Amino acid sequence: MSESAEVHVAYSRLWDVYFFVIAAANAAAVLASGEPIGDVVAAGTAIVALAVVHATIGWRVARGPDGPLSITVLAVQVGLFVVAASTVPAASWLLFAMIPLIFQMAPVRVAIGAVVLVTLVPSMVDLVTGQGDLKHDLVISAISAMAGIWLGMWIIRVIQQSTERAKLIAELEASRAEVQRLSHEAGVTAERTRLAGEIHDTLAQGFTSIITLIQASDPELRDERLALAVRTAKENLAESRAIVAALSPSALASGLLDSVRRQASRFTEETGVPAGFRVTGEPRDLPTPVEVVLLRATQEALTNVRRHAHANEVAVLLAYSPVSARVVVRDDGRGFDPDGTDGFGLPGMRQRAEQVGGTLTVRSDPDTGTTIELEVPA
């Protein structure tokens, strides 16, 4: 339930309590009026019926939109009031309950007419019976009608202001939540940038220095142990560069398509293994979390190929469809058992895919190599 609806319900409950208190007080006043017993019974029965109607259906109708049902229920209640007030004059004090009720259950114009009608009941009784002070009662009716209309308009205005205030509070809370989210994202971005800088300034430069020092001592790398050390250092240098690229906030600055294409090109430059890139469908901007997951999957899959596959060729596909987007990385390497290992970054890839409602599919065998496919709705 929205806050504006809660405010409306809260006010309705207060008026319900008010209505039943006034009805009970008027029932007591009718019993103590000293009028003929038949009139007292008739007026008392009408007041009780009025309260029963409100307790069973009236309060629900008052909380809903104005319509034929609310007008019908209101007509019944007004009729019961007319019976009570025309039988025992003391029942006219029910006006204090009827006027707020009328404005809750009818459109403004209909409510104003109904208020004028109920305030004229004592005067009409005087006119029909020929008893009572007609002029005096007409003055009282006019004053009651004006006061009732003013009270009803004030009630409507109070409810409108409360509803608007609740709506404004809800908008402010939503804005505050958005500011907190953006602040969190800014903090995450700053931390990722810091980590990227740390890795670049320490690990990446350290691996570069190791390679330079080893090649300076043995340029031809005749010593197999030194050659292995250089290969290992180059692989880890490539890994650190990939991590820096992944952490950098500019990784997706030019869009997902160019970012994935750059990953394939960088893979070829660093490993010498051809990595073809192809795109199908109509490229379009996707939500940032979706693009991040697809890019990370590409990076992780190419890292697996670099480290484990011993492949001679790699193919990267970025495919767009009207309802989804997917990235496929295929190699012709030695393969592995997808069900028999928790390595190769697969758990992390699956977790990231699940965060955006995507699915990760891995197919691998020694004869055909490995295919990693990640598809997300977009």
Image (cartoon, rainbow, N blue to C red):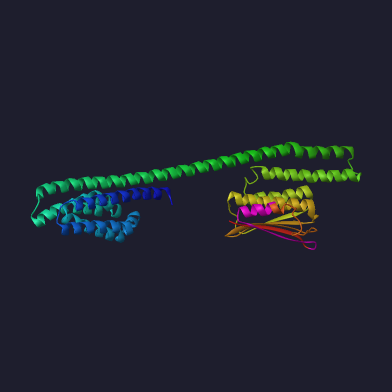
The magenta stretch spans residue 14? no
Residue 370 locus on image (x, y percent) = 75, 59
Which quadrant: the C terminus? bottom right
x 37%, y 50%: residue: 9
User: In front: 194, or 97?
Assistant: 97
Q: Is residue 29 visible?
A: yes
Q: Is residue 296 left or right of residue 169?
A: right
Which residues fall within the magenta stretch? 348-367
- Please give the name of the residue rendered at 69% of the width and 44% of the height, measured from the top-left corner: 245
Q: Percent x, y for residue 210? A: 82, 38
As drawn, 280 above or below 296: below
Query: Does residue 318 appear anywhere in the picture?
Result: no
**181 displayed left or right of 66:** right
Above or below for 302 versus 184: below
**In the visual, does 313 lie left or right of 133?**
right
Single out the residue that lies furthest toward the bottom: 367
Question: Which residue is more in the foreground, 321 or 126?
Answer: 126
Q: Is residue 115 left or right of residue 138?
A: right
366 is within the stretch colored magenta:
yes
Q: Position of residue 110 (x, y in %)?
A: 25, 55
Residue farthest toward the left in the current orientation of the protein: 130
Q: Residue at x 48, y 42 (%)?
A: 175
The answer to whether 91 is drawn above or below residue 191 in the figure is below
Q: Nearer the viewer, residue 87 or 234?
A: 87
- The picture places residue 67, in percent across and down from the top left corner, at 31, 59
Q: Nearer the viewer, residue 356 or 82?
A: 82
- Tag count in the figure? 0
